[in-house]
Amino acid sequence: MAAAQWSQRHDLWLDCTGAGELGVAAVAGVPSHRVLVHGVNKSPDDLEAAVAQAGVIVVDNLTELARLAEMAREQPTRFPDLWLRIRPGVAVETHSYRQTGQQDSKFGLSLDEALEAVALCQQHQISLTGIHFHQGSHFHDPAPIGPALDIVLDTVARLRSQHGWTPQVISPGGGWGVAYHEDELPHPPIADYVKFVAERLVAGCLARGLPLPRLQLEPGRSLVARAGVAVYTVGAVKQSATRRWLLLDGGMSDNIRPALYGARYSALPVVDPLREAPTPAWLAGPYCESGDVLIEELPMPQMAAGELVAIPASGAYHLNMSSNYNGARRPAVLWLKEGQVRLIQRRETVEDLVARDYGLSE
């Protein structure tokens, strides 16, 4: 919730998925005109919450659009603007789990379905204002966005020709990566990505005689990843046949990314971080999975139980993907600013773990 509140101090929109995140945004006081709703399979509850609380709903499929058309008939006085999410069919260079714009992706409408969707919106007099596409997450080269954007603009030209409609907004989504590991330095700045997309969009519209839309980006990870640092306590140090293990009090329950798709991180001791690191270590969590390894083969100094280890760039896709696996209790979250520390989320308790349970009656 604190992150949602922070976003409003900087006039940012929130990208919400489903009724849960919409509820958090509402409690945080985010106005509806700064709320955009995504989702590949929005439930009826999700759509009801989106209609009530969002300024924009990004339509993923024709089934969803038909439901929204019915809802629009029932509440004609106030209805969010709609955008269409389309699949350009171009893949970016990232892990396959993070690719979202290729032809066989589960996300978005095909180009032909987009034509059908525009006709449906016109038939039901629904406010359709934007086109959205998203090529993938955590990529470092904006070049593949170019062909995808060209395909999108070709589709917009078809939409204008066949239906007389052009979008007020075009959003190529987000996905710009950050440096998680020393090997990824120096990392291209986000300004390179923004400049590339903006210039390609302007040139593409001029070449096709299209009016210039508003360009809307989703910087997400590139804004918040480096703002978060995960701090773990070393519980034990052990030497196996070929590896030195630093066993930490957290792992895949609070950061599933290394186990899920091989995400790489770096780490350093909290105390005396620049001390000599002569030998590699494997940093692993306490959970009952051999895949519960946060970092493999990282040069680390000699460490002892009780010492603290910091993993930078933990502010994105970390705690929000956490679980209670093995009864793990999620850690506390502290907000640090200008030397001041504030608790913004308390540590979970055993009582939290059983709060939703009823048990078996005799």
Image (cartoon, grey):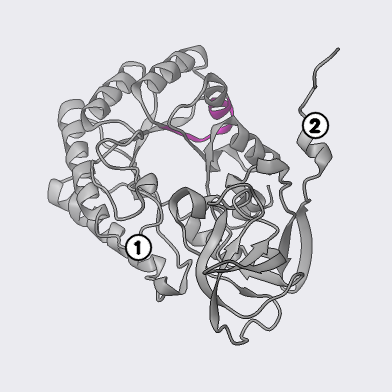
Mark 1: few, some, or many residues within 10 Å (few <14, many ≥20)? many
What is the spatial separation of the Cα atoms under label 1 and label 2, in whole angstroms?
42 Å
Q: Where is residue 172 shown, x and y percent of the image?
A: 34, 48
Horizontal side of residue 339 vs 173, given as left or right = right
Q: In the depicted view, which residue is nearer to us: 241 or 68?
A: 241
Label 1 or label 2, whichever comes before in sequence order: 1
* Percent x, y of residue 161: 15, 31
Disc 1 or disc 2, which is closer to the eye? 2
Q: Secondary structure at mark 2?
A: loop
Identify the residue position indicated by label 1 in the image. Answer: 140
Q: Which mark is residue 284?
A: none
Give me the residue at 28% from left, 38% from top. 87
User: Can residue 248 be found in the magenta stretch?
Assistant: no
- In the picture as drawn, the residue positioned furthest to the front comes out as 241
Q: Residue at x 80, y 17 (%)?
A: 360
Secondary structure type for disc 1: loop
Residue position for label 2: 355
Q: Tell me if residue 230 can be seen.
A: no
**Residue 52 magenta-highlighted:** yes
Give amino acid for label 2.
Ala
Instruction: Confirm whether residue 291 shows in the render.
Output: yes
Above or below, 194 relative to 71 = below
The percent position of residue 127, horizontal first and vertical second, equals 39, 28
Quadrant of the snapshot with the C terminus: top right
Range of magenta residues: 49-58
**45 w.r.t. 138: above or below:** above
On screen, residue 265 versus residue 116, left or right, reads right
Pinpoint residue 210: horizontal percent, then vertical percent.
20, 44
Dot 1 amino acid type: His
Instruction: Identify the residue shown where x is 52% and y is 24%.
Output: 47
For residue 235, above or below residue 277:
above
Q: Residue at x 53, y 69 (%)?
A: 266
